[in-house]
Amino acid sequence: MASFLSSKHSQANPGDRWGDSPFGKNTQVNSRESNHETLRLVAKCTDHYTTGPDHGNLPVYIPSKWGEGGYHGGGRQRGISAHRDVESRAECHQLPLLEVHVKLNLQEIKMEPEESCSSSRPLLAQQTGRCMSTQAMQALNDLRRNNQLCDALLRLEDGGTFPVHRAILSSCSTYFRALFTTTLHTSDKTDVLVPGVSSEMMSLILEYAYLRNLPVNQNNVYKLLVTADYLCVIGVLELCSEFLRSSLNEENCIGIMRFAREHFCTRLESDATMYVMRHFVTVAQKSNELLELPLEEMCKVIGANELNVKTEDTVWESVLRWINHDPDNRKMHIVDLMKNIRLGLLETQYFLEHVKDHPYVTNNEACRPVIIETLKFLYDLEMITQKDGEVPTPEIARPRVPHEILFAIGGWSGGSPTNFMETYDTRADRWVKVEVDPTGPRAYHGTAVVVNSIYVIGGFDGMDYFNSCRCFNAVLKKWREVAPMNARRCYVSVSVHNDLIYAMGGYDGHHRQNTAERYNFKTNQWSLIAPMNMQRSDACATTLNDRIYITGGFNGQECMNSAEAYDPETNQWTLITPMRSRRSGVSTITYHGCVYVLDMYNPRSNFAIEVIDDMVFAIGGFNGVTTIYHVECFDEKTGECY
């Protein structure tokens, strides 16, 4: 059931040029036609913006970026082969003509080396001291191997013996520190039995203790982690956890999650659990470990609010797969499992054909109350859809927390630029208002996401053209100013590569530009890069395979069909095959390994475009007559628009 929220945009254009509203080839337009932008942002952060349950540590997606001019030259478009003019997606309250794409990724956990040899220090003594540390540890390890100056002997149950230096082991293991500092072991020579540890694992632990070197691999990581946990060697625990974290996939994530839980590796358990939640669709299809879960853990997984599924039929089918693995002992648990599925979110036809009449359900009398409750809710939902009103949301229909959320930021609304911001919850199908930028309105800007922050770059407020940049922390929900660009740019094209933000082309109030620059958030500095081959404003950029592609735009005289690619390694722009149509206010995106310039059966320009749940969303824009606030999405798997 979709809710439609109106949005209006101003008829004002920055600059006095009919060409700044480049409509299409052979199309004449008045110089005061509407301009539109669309923000596309994709973000992932530990906080989220949703109408569903309040669960943190989730990814977030965002929309934004605007176009110079109202209508691209594509006309009736080719990019979508099947279309149903059904507005089943919620519409944006105040859709900006601005399209921004940002993706916030979970911060990577990086192991810092415990020792390093710094060559940047001006003092020779410090440099020598740091380098001597490695040499000293190697010398101590040689002494251990030669049984020289050792003051303890470790005996293992498998017959292995290891002469060691007590101070070295005590420095990295609280187990050995406690062992060697008790009154039982204060003599010059200590002979100790260490139970439960094999010679192979002890050799690896000692190699880490003396050299901080540890060859972790798939064959030894589990035994090594158990041994490190037993001996309280925190450094080895972290290395093993990092190895398992980096090797997570759909087939082993559940096993790693359970293993981490058993050994109290809370951070690894959390990461593995989130991996299961995020990739549950493929986990449910491929993982044999899922089939080995006990009932309680299976219920916990499928009942989680964070479970990332577009439709609940995925959850139902995973339940059937789990039961079919051992039907005689598991079919009796069908009612417990059904209580953790959001049955009210299933399509009515699917529920009637695949759930209600399934033998596991019909043969279990305890399922009857669950079926009745779901049927009643689905019936009420059908009735309320035909009337104005609301239906209370029961537990069986509570939306799960989305892993991807669209943000619409700024733009034109009500005849002037706005600083309005809202987010779209893909699970609840609703737009929600978010904290606005207190510095004032901004339109025709670019946006990008790096780490957990959304950057709003350049733009126009109805009077001034900006080179300033604002940064919104999606976790803290706070705005701040960052370093300005070297040039004023509205209708700017923005893309991200390797956490560097690239701003290209645009309009400064006098000229269309071919200059480009990039921003490093670590140094808070913009630096100029090689200029493009052509002047472009109201173009659109995207990143694919370490190249930045920019398409279309307006050069001050005509709409363009040219496109070019930038190689950050060589700092060079290269013209590529031109598009078939001239386009300004174009929307470009990377999707399934290709660069797409999207066309629509219902013509629109300057619309936002984003990939969410592996579907392409088109948001707002201009239809040649007026601004629009409709939101559509295209599902490549079904070949349909919604």
Image (cartoon, rainbow, N blue to C red):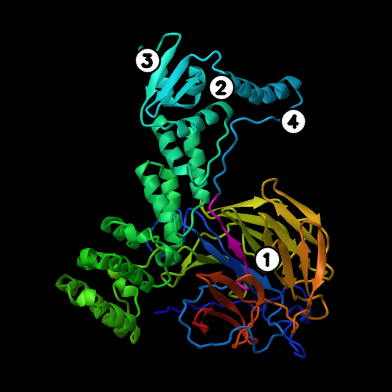
Point out the frontmost of discs 3 and 2.
2
The kind of residue on which mark 2 rests is: Arg
Residue at figure coordinates x 69%, y 77% from the top left: 585
Residue at figure coordinates x 64%, y 63% from the top left: 447
* In the foreground, 305 or 557: 305
Residue labelled with disc 3 = 182
Q: Secondary structure at mark 1?
A: strand
Asked if one can make out residue 209 in the rendered structure from this viewpoint, the answer is yes
* In the foreground, 420 or 117: 117
Residue labelled with disc 4 = 119
Q: Relative to 395, say whether 112 is above or below.
A: above
Q: Are marks 1 and 2 in contact (CB under 8 Å)?
A: no
The kind of residue on which mark 1 rests is: Leu
Q: Relative to 126, say whether 374 is above or below.
A: below
Q: Position of residue 615 (x, y in %)?
A: 53, 74
Q: Residues within 10 Å of mark 4 (few under 14, many from 20)?
A: few
Residue labelled with disc 1 = 544
Asked if one can make out residue 513 in the rendered structure from this viewpoint, the answer is no
Q: Relative to 343, say whether 143 is above or below.
A: above
Cα distance between the residues tagged 3 and 1: 61 Å
Q: Position of residue 356 (x, y in %)?
A: 25, 79
Residue labelled with disc 2 = 145
Residue at figure coordinates x 58%, y 57% from the top left: 438
Cα distance between the residues tagged 3 and 4: 42 Å
The reply, left or right, for residue 396 in relation to residue 521 is: left
- The magenta region covers 96-107
Q: Secondary structure at mark 4?
A: loop
Q: Which mark is residue 399?
A: none
Point out the frontmost of discs 1 and 2.
2
